[in-house]
Image: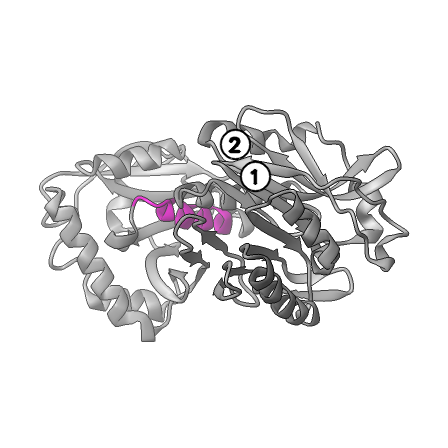
Amino acid sequence: MQKNIENHLRFVERAIKLNADIIIFPKLSITNYEPQLAKALATKVEDKLFNPFQELSNKNEIVIGVGMPIMATGGIQISLLIFQPNKARSVYSKQILHADELPYFVNGDKQTIFTIKEKKIAFGICYETLQEAHFVNAIKKQADVYIASVAKPQTGIDKANQFFSKMTKTYSIPIIMANCVGPCDNFISAGQSTVWNAKGERVSQLDTTHQGILIYDTETGHSEKEQLTIEKGTLADLDVLFQMYNKAKDRLENDKIYQWTNNYPKSSIIKNDLESKVLYVLKNNDRIIGAINISELQEPEYKTIDWQFNDAKVLVIHRLVVHPNSQNKGFAKLLMDFAEAFGRQNNYTSIRLDAYTQNKPVVTFYKNRDYVVRGHIYFPERKYPFYAMEKALT
């Protein structure tokens, strides 16, 4: 469960970067939808396990709703645990259970409305969101937006597409549906989280297999999506990658930072990375926005450094880049999180990298991630040295 919470927190941080006021996760998102395990996994609202959500809410003025089985007086409820800035935790629990949930859960007893920046938000959880009576009750309470937190297979998504479109047209209220992806109990959840505007039009939708974020602006009706994937690059990506590295080099030089030269990183170097299958690319909606080389290859200059983990299994980072149009949005952090997770999963003891001493923001970035300077190294065509930096993974 702890790893799942960490994954949630990463998505909350992404939502913060996107200036969201509220983020709601799918049904029972913390534990997954596994009714037979609910009793063993259920907890209380006050559980300190969820303190990081409250801290992020307080610090960033964001409302967070995570799916969790919660202990109630009569049994276990399917709930959204709601964190609001500097307020006590709240809970909305599913009021209308599906027949196959009755052996495991008990009903919630009220429709809670949350007011966020003068907008009244109503919640529904899965089966009840397709019951018109539940939706009408939210309308009676003057809801401005209806958010459905669900775990639905493709048949359920097909029903939701028709029903939610009809409800938005009939009652002139936008609906946002957050659905799981992947295995849930005895079915495969089909993703396709969707936003419908007040005219019944489908504004935006995620795909069936990848996690992501949908952002809906209640003032403008505009929606955007972020579906991030990190995967090994292929030779078909070479031209796009080379252009991205060049644009990043131009941005650095505009800031009077000359860490990259006309000979580095050149197309042949990137091609070699791709052929060696050590260059991972970050994509947003299938568009490459970043890259990172993760390998065991160390520059000859590294031999001059008194590393702490000389005899250990060492991972090395090279050529981390984010497209200038996507910088300052947390993507470098995402790539480094991926690299460090890769290192731990593959039993590496430490990570090594080098950072140009004149690139102060990058040096600070690594130091904040607990990378320690072990010495200085020089590379051709650079006036100033690079820091040789290292971080323990164990």
Q: Quadrant of residue 3?
A: top right
| Dominant secondary structure of the residues highlighted in magenta in the image | helix
Q: Which residue is mark 1?
A: 64
- Snapshot quadrant of residue 161: bottom right
Q: Circle 2 is placed at which residue position?
A: 57
Q: Is residue 11 above or below residue 279?
A: above
Q: Nearer the viewer, residue 199 or 381?
A: 199
Q: Residue at x 57, y 60 (%)?
A: 168
The magenta span reads 328-343
Residue 306 visible in image: no
Amino acid type, residue under disc 1 in the picture? Ile
Q: CA distance from mark 1 to mark 2?
A: 7 Å
- Residue 86 in view of the camera: yes
Whether 387 is drawn above or below 262: the answer is above
Q: Position of residue 93 (x, y in %)?
A: 74, 42
Judged left or right of residue 355, residue 316 is right
